[in-house]
Amino acid sequence: MTEQTRPYDVAADALFLDFDGTLVDLAPQPDGIVVPPELITLLQQIQLESDGALAIVSGRPLDQLDFFLAPLRLPAAGVHGAERRTADGRILQQPVPDVQHLRERLLPLVDSHSGLQLELKRGALALHYRHAAHLEQRCVDTMMEALRHEPGFTLLHGKMVVEAKPHINKGDAVAAFLHEAPFRGRRPVFIGDDVTDEAGFAIAQGEVFGGLGIKIGAGPTQALQRLADPAAVLGLLRQSVEVRSTSG
Ligand SMILES: O=P(O)(O)OC[C@H]1O[C@H](O[C@H]2O[C@H](CO)[C@@H](O)[C@H](O)[C@H]2O)[C@H](O)[C@@H](O)[C@@H]1O
């Protein structure tokens, strides 16, 4: 694993950060994560020193990101890009399919196993099996069968979760940010840990923007660099801010 990631350049780059597994350690429940207070301080500093070229790009809805990162309200993409808050504070929502029919198709499985949890979002539905890992294949099969009847969704198999999401991805959201101030013209650096982040790496590192992807943890990836865990990401953010303050 490459640990020699150079600090990204706060003054010149645009930073895109995944949330779960990247900024915070994974937790047994979606609402059980712990946000280190230092993270809030660092994000605030980076936002100031980059003229606002910092965005969170997550599978979580925007309101959850705002809750966990309070008092910050950063530019952000939620639900894998289905909703987006621009740097000037506008909320843009992609048209998304209704999840109710899909939910009804999944409920019999969830209701008959206490270790399964359904997370309902606007236009997406996550089936968590972290507490019933032996049911992984059942969850995948059930979701795939349900999606045969609900064509508006893409299946995403993440960390202990199988999710139906709209046909939009994090790469679309990153590209949209990069066409707007203050992101436009900056080199994108995208940091993420899961399969949903590969679309972000692809856009960041592609010919158009010529940036960098940094994968957190193990597993196959197209990202050019890698860091071990959220503690290492915190270290990278800290170092980047320090480099900026010592270079004037
Ligand atoms: O794109 P991300 O910011 O990484 O969000 C991905 C999903 O994160 C959450 O689920 C994951 O984290 C939970 C808390 O650590 C964990 O309990 C769960 O097993 C993980 O899959 C969130 O609940 C999802 O909505 C996000 O899509």
Image (cartoon, helix red, strand yellow):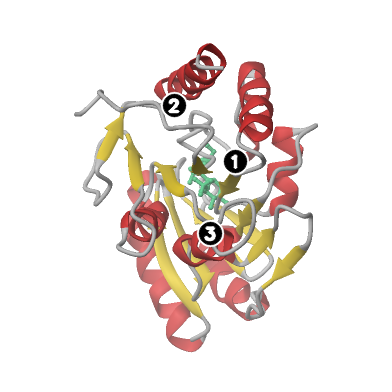
Give left or right: position of 17 versus 51. Answer: left
Q: On the image, numbered disc 1 is attached to which residue?
A: 30
The kind of residue tagged 2 is Val
The number of discs equals: 3
Q: From the viewer's side, name the closer residue of 228 and 2.
A: 2
The kind of residue tagged 3 is Leu
Residue drawn at x 46%, y 17% as measured from the top left: 239
Indicate the secondary structure of the residue bearing disc 3: helix
- N-terminal of the pair, mark 1 or mark 3, is 1
Task: State which mark lies toward you, 1 or 3.
Answer: 3
For residue 233, what is the image quadrant?
A: top left
User: How packed is label 1: few (under 14 Cα within 10 Å), some, or many (20 or more)?
Assistant: few
For residue 203, what is the image quadrant?
A: bottom left
Residue 139 visible, this angle: no
Query: Cβ(mark 3) to ligand 1 < 8 Å?
Result: no
Q: CA distance from mark 1 to mark 2?
A: 20 Å
| Residues marked 3 and 2 touching at CB (< 8 Å) | no
Q: From the viewer's side, name the closer residue of 54 and 194.
A: 54
Residue drawn at x 52%, y 32% as measured from the top left: 10
Which mark is on residue 233?
A: 2
Query: Cβ(mark 1) to ligand 1 < 8 Å?
Result: yes
- N-terminal of the pair, mark 1 or mark 2, is 1
Q: On the image, numbered disc 3 is attached to which residue?
A: 178
